[in-house]
Amino acid sequence: MDRLSVRRFSSRAEAERHYLALVDSEAEAARYVSPAQEAVYRLKLAEAAQGSGPMVEAEATATDADVITVCQRIKRARTRWEKRAGTIEEARIAAKADIRRSDTPADMHRALTRFRNAL
């Protein structure tokens, strides 16, 4: 749960910049995958698209599954990730629009809270 504290901004513009930056930062954190892990995911997806490869075969062996099943799992995982990334981006855009329309920093904070809850 967020603990509310009073923070004074020198202007509405300063408050807006603060809350817009928080939205961007939290969206980035929600989407974050390390560069090394992203490289592995891309390689596995390429192998799954081809129907096999060393990483797919290693996963099939490790999970006692057939290669086709592993390829399907990898493709489904990518589809879920793409949907999740889209949901995060949609929420980010909506939150930033809400912040820009807000009259007060308290309204901006509420928009940020709605965004966090949407994640």
Image (spheres, grey):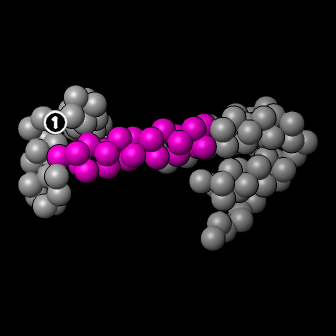
In the rendered image, the vertical position of residue 77 relative to residue 4, given as above or below: above
Residue 63 visible in this rendered orientation of the protein: yes
Mark 1 Cα-neighbour bin, 10 Å: few <14, some 14–19, many ≥20: some
Residue at 17% x, 57% y: name it.
65
Residue 20 rendering spot, x and y as whole percentages: 68, 37
Residue at 66% x, 38% y: name it.
90
Residue 11 visible in this rendered orientation of the protein: no
Residue on which the image places disc 1: 52
Please name whichever residue, 87 or 93, is drawn nearer the observer in this view of the structure: 87
Question: Label 1 is placed on what type of residue?
Answer: Ser
Query: For residue 97, which quarter of the picture?
Result: top right
Please name whichever residue, 101 or 54, is drawn nearer the observer in this view of the structure: 54
SS class of the residue under badge 1?
A: loop
Q: Look at the magenta stretch and give its main secondary structure.
A: helix
Residue 17 rendering spot, x and y as whole percentages: 70, 34
Please name whichever residue, 11 or 63, is drawn nearer the observer in this view of the structure: 63
Asked whether 33 falls inside the magenta stretch, the response is no
Give the residues drawn in magenta, as a range: 67-89
Residue 52 placement, left or right of 73 = left
Query: For residue 18, which quarter of the picture?
Result: top right
Residue at 71% x, 56% y: name it.
113
Residue at 46% x, 46% y: name it.
80
How many numbered circles are shown? 1
In the rendered image, the vertical position of residue 100 relative to residue 81, given as above or below: above
Residue 23 rendering spot, x and y as whole percentages: 63, 42
Asked whether 70 falls inside the magenta stretch, the response is yes
The image quadrant where one finds the N terminus is: bottom right
Residue 29 rendering spot, x and y as whole percentages: 47, 46
Residue 92 placement, left or right of 28 = right
Query: For residue 92, which quarter of the picture?
Result: top right
Residue 8 placement, left or right of 55 = right
